[in-house]
Image: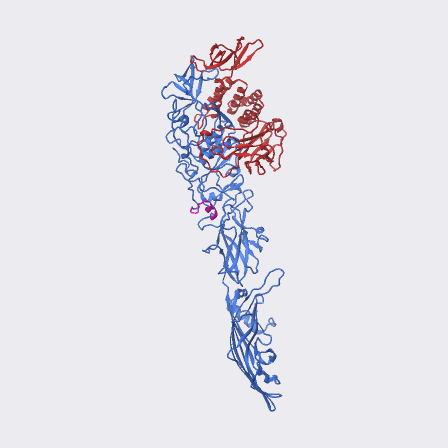
Chain colours: A red, B blue
Amino acid sequence: MISLFHKLMSHGRCRFVAAALLISCLRLLSQAADTNAPLVSISVNDSGEAQVFRGMPLLVSVSLINPHALSAEAVPVVIGSSQGAWTNSVRVDILDSAGNSQSWPFNSGILPSATIILDSANFGRLDRWLNPDQTLNLSTGAYSLRVVLDTTSVTTDGAWQGIVESAPATLEIVDEPATLSEARAENKYSQLANYEMFLNNPTNALNRINQLLADYPTNFAGLRIKARALDALGRTAEAHTLTAQAIESFYAINTVIQEPPINLLLLQRELEQTLLNPTLRLTVAQNQEVTMDWIGHPSLSYTVENSTNLLAWSLFSTNFNLAPDRYFLTAPKIGENAFFRLSVGNASSSGAR
Amino acid sequence: MLFSGFPKVALLSAFAFFSNHGLSLAASEDPTRFLAVTNWYATFTRTLRSAGVGDGVCHTEWSFSHSGEIKTELPLLPGIHGIPGLPDIPPRWTDIGKTNQSLVFQLHDTGTETCGDESDVYRADAPGKMQVYQSAVLQLDTTATNYTLGLGYFVGPYDATVNGDPFPPTTLAWTAGSQGIITEPLPASGMILQGQRSYPVDQITVYDGILTIASSALGNELELLHGELVIGWTLTPVLEEVEVVVDGPDYEDWLPKGDVKDWTKGGDTLYLTASLQTKDGNIPLAARAKNFKFELLNVSTEKGVCLNRPHEEFADTKADLKFVAQSNQPPLVAFPLQIDNGGMTATTADGQYLIATAGVSSFDFGAYGEIKVTATVNGTNIVGYYKKDSTKTKPILLPKRQPNSFIADKWKKDHGVTGLADDDDAENEPVGDSHTGDGFSLYEEYRGFSQNLTHIRLDPKKKDFFILDRMKTSDSLLGIAMFTDGTGLNVHSRMLAEEFHAALGANGELFDTLVNFNHSNGPHTIDQHGIAIIRSPTAKGRSYAGTDPKIENRGQGGTPGHYLTVTIDPASSGWKRVDTGNGHSQIRPVGAADIAHELSHTCAVWHHGDSDGDPVLWQIINSEVFEYGLQIEPRRENNTLMAIVFQEGSSSAALVIGAPQGQHSGDDNCYMRYYTSEAYRSAVNNKVRYLVDEAPGLALCNSSKGSGVNAAGRSPQSRYGDAAANRGNCKAQLCVSDVYDGKHQR
């Protein structure tokens, strides 16, 4: 669920996701194709068996992939619709435990194209959600969700025609219990925090996830989401430290490991890349005074150089003002053409850049 | 007084009968046995003797002597029975129209009438050759148990003179007295109809044509006539030899089915038609079955309807083949069948049948049994065989199969496994390690499984693997696709929780992914397991093969039954950007690769190396970086120096450093290779550490050689080299059969 909302943000809210896989590195044997019918699945809050408290956000995700998506020789599958966007061929059936069909007021932020192509580089994804206020109006109980892709009446040239149905996802809507186990607290606050991240509101996300960490301070999901929220707030150094602590905690807990903490390690590396490749932000005041700032880290050294022609560079400064999470440098007006660049090294004289 | 109403003779006879036979009754043969007669070879005899002298109005002298025999054949004229709108017409046998009757006839008749002085002399004699005209008819009444013989022959012409003058050619009637009809009871046993009757000549008139012209001598003194006409007959039957053949348009291709959604319902019905035919394959002229009886024998009672449906507590062991009443009524069958014996028997009502059809309903995808079809024909039970079976095996095997197999021939033929035994589990695609099979016997592959409440039969030439995807995300979907493509296994990933042995709880508690739990008598190799992909209810920081948090570290080298699940960290999804160094970014499916990785562990595939060791602590002291006291130089692979991010407020950082022949070694596009290393050690300068960014692989390797970043001769060096001994070449480690669990300590 963490990555889900992140993905929504990263890819512009619930739209067809193009994932450029590394085709050139694929050395796969082509699998004999029985059919070109796409593989489809449906999940709720990133799970095939979700439990949602009323008042939690609810995200329904439909995925479509080429049946031979991992083969470089996958025959592209074109998904269209008999009318309008390709998503019109996708039907999500929601049934309650008595088999009654449900109609829920899903939100959607997409403007889908007429067709999509599923191949070894692209898959399709359709996300629809209910915000926390909306789930308050849902009846408690068990539901099943199934997606049906029906293109039998599509006449678009080359489009795949057929019908394919997913295995069902199950959803249980319940009222929040008086006390929450760690798993349930993680479920609740992770979803809420991710939803806030989805709304580009990392402050609220941080508040939400801190509620989880208040009771369960070593919860890995909580630590990871908090690191992301901190990063989104520009507090990357804090995020990095938090991640490093989480990794240390992991190795302390797991003395004999079967698999490493891949996601924490990847997050740490991602944060390091942000810190090692800071973006220099320039602000020019009315008096032409220039202020530069960037996300900084105390274990790193920074050098600002300037140039008038982008060819010859001179040391401009190695002394900066510190503010929480950011380094500042203010310079007086310095002429018509002024270029600045920032180099990063360890707080050493090694000259690493 | 008690028996006053019975003739004494009858009472004595009855007493004698019971004295001889105790209380049993002598059984008479079924009178309908005569209905199987196609022809009767008949011999009819006729004698007439009369001679005398008498005086009435005139004086008369006469001597009549007839003796003749007709041999003929009475073929069947089929009757009509049970056809709406038409009256029942019993079968008849007659030689009408036949010209091959043979006749032997002797005739010497003289008659003289003297009235006063005048005498008239009449003579009749058989010439050298006489012919038979007209015909005889035999009719049976099996209800009344009698037969009626209608004789309507004429023989002639004979030679006749009156006072020496020739008389015009005349024939002689060969009838049973004046009425021409004989009705006799059918014999209680045996098949020959035989008898004779005598008719006083004085009851015959000259107009019956029974007497010759010589009887004219008695024209005025008929009261003087005496003597008798004796008609005899012997009819020997030609019985029709019949057999019962069974056929059905779908029999050859029929595969039994059940219903995975409602296992109390039949899945399919096979209609078989039993026909009475002559030995040479023609429609019988005479024989009809009194009834047809269909019996199911040795019917399988496999648990459930297939190997994983319904769940074990609902799976019964009732018969897998049955006759169901609603499937055996018109218009589905020509004649309604009475279902008895718990659906094991279906019988027509008594009647006269040439055919009958029965529908056999299957309640299991691996149902098997035998069907015995018996026709009662003229009191004899005839068991049918499959029409195209030259061996005429009885009973008939259901479905069409070999006697030593429960599997339909059709399925075996379609899959090219005709020669394999039901317990075979030796498929070897993909080859994997040296262990063949997938844990499912050939019969189990045929009987099949429920997947997403749809029945599937497996490919007997490929190894199969079952997955319950409890995540159902794009990551899991793609991860499964990656695993499928990498392994070459026949992966069934749309399984439902209830299609495994144990219902799954919501929070990942222990459960069992045994998938072939519904087995009884069919060959069963081993309790084979699938794998459930579960999203860890609480983040553990990692994914792993296994299910029980208390025993997560199940080691490597097991088969599905060793792990049951792969538990995926909730954060293990999303996409990671990788700088390719050529100005492009790739997006690699980290979550999917992790899922494929863990799935492959459950098929006995190991990491590329055993360990890279714990993270190494780097410290920054006076602006220099140290690794356990050794000053080091963190560099990029282009040998430029690179900065390190240490923890805020700390002077240390823990880094994963990959080792040669460690978990990052081997083919760098294999998803079994780790991609968490942040650095590796220079092979030529013990101070240099190259900082790197690894990426997950997308395939399953088929070599232990290092490739890509691990390729030999790479600059500045191969990062981690070839895979460790007995590691890498992951495709060749693959084993899915639980038969071999514990046998992969490589």
Q: How many labels were placed on the picture? A: 0
Segment colored magenta: B408-419
Q: Position of residue B556 (x, y in %)?
A: 42, 32
Quick one: B676 or A329, which is closer to the camera? A329
Question: Residue A193's quadrant in the figure?
Answer: top right
Camera sees residue B705? yes
Quadrant where the C terminus of chain B is found in the figure: top left
In the image, is residue A170 above or below residue B413? Answer: above
**Residue most toward the left?**
B684
Using the rendered view, name the quadrant where residue A131 is placed: top right
* Residue B290 against residue A286 in the figure, above or below: below
Above or below, B233 against B374 in this view is below
Give the camera-side residue of A129 and A329.
Answer: A329
Quarter of the image with the N terminus of chain B is: bottom right
Q: Position of residue B193 (x, y in %)?
A: 53, 70
- Return the x and y of residue B576 as percentages of the image width and height: 49, 25
Residue B472 located left or right of residue B635:
right
Q: Is residue B411 magenta?
A: yes
Spot the residue most to the bottom.
B117
Where in the figure is residue A22, as x and y percent of width and height?
47, 28
Find out whether residue A315 is within the magenta segment: no
Can residue B563 be seen in this snapshot? no
